[in-house]
Structure formats: structure tokens, C-alpha cells
Image (tube, rainbow, N blue to C red):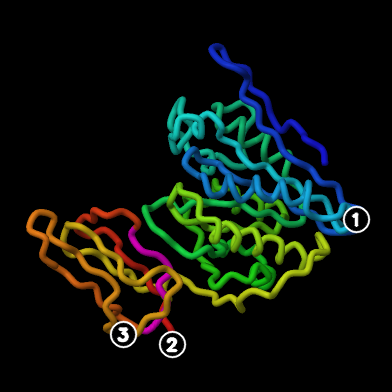
Amino acid sequence: MKKIEILRIESLSRAPFVVEGYLFEGSDVTAPSIAIIGAMEGDSILPLYCASSLVDFFKNKIEEKKIKGNVLIIPSINHYALNIGKRFWPLDNTDLNMMFPGYELGETTQRIAKKVFDAINGYTYGIILERRPDPATCIPYVKLFKSGYEDLKAAKKFGFKMIHHRTVKSIDTVTLQYNWQLWGTKAYSIMCPHENQIDKKTASQINQGMLRFMDKNKVIEHHIFNGYESTVINRESIEVIKAPKSGIFIQIESAGRYVSKDQVIGEIVHSLEGNVIHTFLAPCDGMITCFYSTSLIYENAVAFRIAKIG
């Protein structure tokens, strides 16, 4: 293992800002390579944990000869925000994942993005661990842009239940996944639940998916059980259920559960009087992909998303 410095920025009032990566060199120069990016936001605790656990795996739990291609893991990019629990870059509140491919003469976050992108450019595969931006508990799934450069077939090798194959919006053209794809890397985002509490079961599912992907693509030799035959969905495949009223939200069915049309999946309780003022019924047969993760819900907030069956 080599611990490499990706970037260093001097600070006037505190220790330098340093981003480091862990490089595990493969034994076969012809094997494909992979780079994995952890927390780009200060509240992305599960992505940080998954990436750091993967570092431990490659350091202590796999034989060096079974690492065929180079594996680079960068667990964290936004330490300043992580240290104070702030989502974005704390000095100017900018989103690092909206700064790619970066600009070496630009603002601080553009310079950070440029250094990171230079370090990871040229890898065969790329994985970005992303936390959902909305307050939602979800199953782990792959988000893949319809960029024209994506590899949907390879995305199924993660073995997750779902792949969200989504249309590129104008704002997506400055994200890491889009630019990585544009420059020839087969890049994927693994979407993690919103919560900051570590769920080891979910973390294990995510890490197993990444290891399964690496094994099936011959980056490593580490056979594990097959996952799911991933279902590819798009925006038209998803039913969005919004709250018609504000109140205390009680979710009855969880993410990953299959439900039938008109099945009770949740309810809203009056905040002051305690009676049920709304019952959520599944509008179709399908699987709950995510649900609202806080106890107080507001009118028109998205309470559930269901991937339709049939």
C-alpha cells in the first residue's frame, strides 16, 4: 500500500488542508484499474465509513497477489466540512461535486476538484459514494447518467436491486460522474441513505457490491455470492407519493419492501391532537425505494417513492 498526497493547501489559521489517497498496486499491468471516491460532503458519514472500511479490507483482509489491477481509494475530500458537520465547503458554501473537472486558477473548490480529477483520471472504472441530498432512507442503488458514455451492462455487476438510469440535466455536467465518463472512465455513483448513523448492514451491502463489481471485472480475485439481477429504472418507473398535510410522519413499510396496490404504507398523525389525519396507500404494485427519514413531515414533501412493477 502507498499513501499518496493528492493535494495540499496551506492555511493562514490552521494546519494545511491535505487530501490523501491509498493506492494498492496490482500484480498484473494488463488488468483494469479502479478509483473509489468517498465523502465529498461534510455530512457524508456512510460514504466515509464505506471507503475507510474498504481501505482496511485491502490492507488486512486480501492477499496482495489477488489484487490484479491498481486500486485507489480516497476516503475523504472535504475534511473541513466533515470536522464541523457542515454539508458543503465551509468557506464559501460551494458543492465540491459541482466543480468538475476543476480549474487550477479558479476558486478554492475548483482547484481542489482539478487536483482530485488529475489524480483519478485514466482509471478504467470509477466509483463515487454519494449521500442522497434529500432527507430519505433508501436502499443502496447505482445512479448512472445517460451521458452516451455510460456502461449499463457493467453497472449490473454490482448486484444491487436497482439501477437508476437517469437523463442528464444541465447541472449534472459539472459533476464528477459525468466528467469522469466524458474522459473515458466507466464511472458510477452508489447512492447511500441520508442518515448519518452508521448502519453496518447497509455498509456491508455497499462494500460487498463494490467487491463483487471488482471481482467480476477482474480488478481483484475475491469471489463472493452473487447479488441481485439489477432492475433498471428511469423517472417514468417511479411513483412519487407526497404528503397532503403536515404532521408527525410514521412509516409503516420500509425501503426495499414489496407492496401491493392500496396497501397501507404509512400515516400522518396530528401534531397536537394525536389522531391520524392521513393514511398513505400504495398507488401501485412495486418496491419502496425510499421514504422520508424525519419524524416531522411538511405538506407536499415526498413521503415515499415506489418503483412500479409491470
* Quadrant of residue 127 within the rendered picture: bottom right
Question: In this figure, which residue is indicated by the disc labeled 1?
Answer: 65
> Bounds of the magenta span?
285-292
* Prevailing secondary structure class for the magenta stretch in the rendered image: strand
Which of the labelled discs sits on residue 261, or is there none?
3
Label 1: element kind: helix
Question: Total label count?
Answer: 3
Q: Which mark sits nearer the N-terminus, 2 or 3?
A: 3
Q: Position of residue 220 (x, y in %)?
A: 81, 60
Work out whether residue 141 or residue 112 is closer to the camera in this orientation and state it.
Answer: 141
Q: Position of residue 307 (x, y in %)?
A: 42, 75
Q: What residue type is labelled 1?
A: Lys
Label 3: element kind: loop
| Mark whose residue sits in front, 1 or 3 | 1
**Residue furthest toward the bottom?**
310
Q: What residue type is labelled 2?
A: Gly
Q: Position of residue 155 (x, y in %)?
A: 65, 68
Q: Does the magenta stretch include residue 89?
A: no
**Residue furthest toward the left?**
273
Question: In this figure, which residue is indicated by the disc labeled 2?
Answer: 310
